[in-house]
Image (tube, helix red, strand yellow):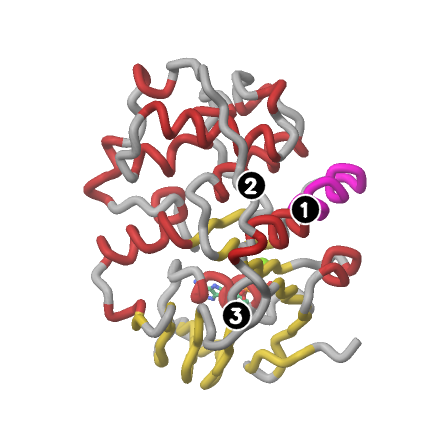
Amino acid sequence: MANHTEILGQTESSRHNVIKPDILLKTIEHPVTIQKEADRHKKMPISPLLSLKGVSRIFKSSTTDIEILKNVDFNIYKGESIAVVGASGTGKSTFLHIVGTLDRPNQGSLFFENKNLFSLGEEDLARFRNSKIGFVFQFHHLLQGFSAMENVMIPCMIRNMSRKKSSMDSETILERVGLKHRIHHRAEDLSGGEQQRVALARALVMKPDILLADEPTGNLDKQNSFQVHNLLVELNSELGMTLMVVTHNSELAALMDKRVTIQDCKIVDVVS
Ligand SMILES: Nc1ncnc2c1ncn2[C@@H]1O[C@H](COP(=O)(O)OP(=O)(O)O)[C@@H](O)[C@H]1O
Ligand SMILES: [Mg+2]
């Protein structure tokens, strides 16, 4: 399972430089608006953004081997939205973690725009994750004791972005997810739905090419789930951001361009 450090695109060596309170606590003066990039990201796939080739994943234990993925080929195209659905324990999270480079397959390759990601060293892979991939999980993994904005600024600080740009970008994206009035609230003082929207803002602040969400509304009530679903769909089209979401929620799955499931250790389209 991925830890905090990996999710945020840090490596062990950069971990200790993350929180710089003097930088984090500075207030914002000039919020900017997110540029609508839809026109630059039309859904006209030519070659895949991400491509899995011959990927196999087996979990070995002392008593038995669990085969989850077997020789899987799968392409993800720029701007598309994909729901990964299916029963518990079939390997949806495993698949998402491999796509996000948080887990390595036993065999096979993952290409991002023709770059073989698992040939990179850990440092380069962490940098890749930080800039290209956003993650949202069922549990928000926010740092308690820090404000919404400080939490969202963390990926920016890891990348040594200036304090001004980090705070401006964080405020902008928090505003976009409907939390302008909560930016200085501490994580633990926010409601569950608000916390998950902060996690979404943190995943998006670096403007990733792809957002990977693992049951992002699994802990939310209907109203908050609805808000997060709408945000995911809007951001997918507004930012041209590729979206892959594992979900048990049929309403959310129905909003995606494509639905796939894991069957016999392969990824197959769901016929709806
Ligand atoms: N690190 C691991 N070691 C051993 N078994 C694992 C590990 N991660 C997942 N599994 C097993 O692999 C199967 C698929 O897990 P997972 O990908 O979490 O499924 P899903 O997300 O579809 O519920 C489960 O049976 C799970 O127990
Ligand atoms: Mg899972």
Query: Vertically, is 6 above or below 253?
Result: above
Amino acid type for the residue under numbered disc 1? Thr
Mark 1 element type: loop
The location of residue 60, given as percent across then percent down, is 40, 74
The location of residue 232, given as percent across then percent down, is 64, 49
Q: CA distance from mark 3 to mark 1?
A: 24 Å
Tell me if mark 1 has few (under 14), some (14-19) or many (20+) residues whose alpha carbon lies within 10 angstroms of its own: many
Instruction: Pick whichever of labels 1 and 2 is earlier in the sequence.
Output: 2
Q: CA distance from mark 3 to mark 2?
A: 21 Å
* Magenta highlight on residue 218: no
Instruction: Pick whichever of labels 3 and 1 is earlier in the sequence.
Output: 3
Residue that carries the numbered disc 2 in the rendered image:
200
Mark 3 element type: loop
Quick one: quadrant of the N terminus? Answer: bottom left
**Magenta segment range?**
221-231
> What residue do we see at 30% from left, 15% from top?
22
Amino acid type for the residue under numbered disc 2? Leu
The location of residue 4, given as percent across then percent down, is 40, 42
- The image quadrant of residue 17 is top left
The location of residue 219, given as percent across then percent down, is 68, 42
Residue that carries the numbered disc 1 in the rendered image:
217
Query: Vertically, is 232 above or below 92?
Result: above
Q: Judge left or right: residue 206 versus residue 176.
A: left
Quick one: quadrant of the C terminus? Answer: bottom right
Viewer-nearest residue: 98 or 150: 150
> What residue do we see at 38% from left, 33% from top?
154
Mark 2 element type: helix
Which quadrant of the frame does ligand 2 lie within?
Answer: bottom right
Instruction: Pick whichever of labels 3 and 2 is earlier in the sequence.
Output: 3
Q: Across the whole image, how many numbered discs are drawn on residues?
A: 3
> What residue do we see at 80% from left, 38% from top?
223
Residue that carries the numbered disc 3 in the rendered image:
77
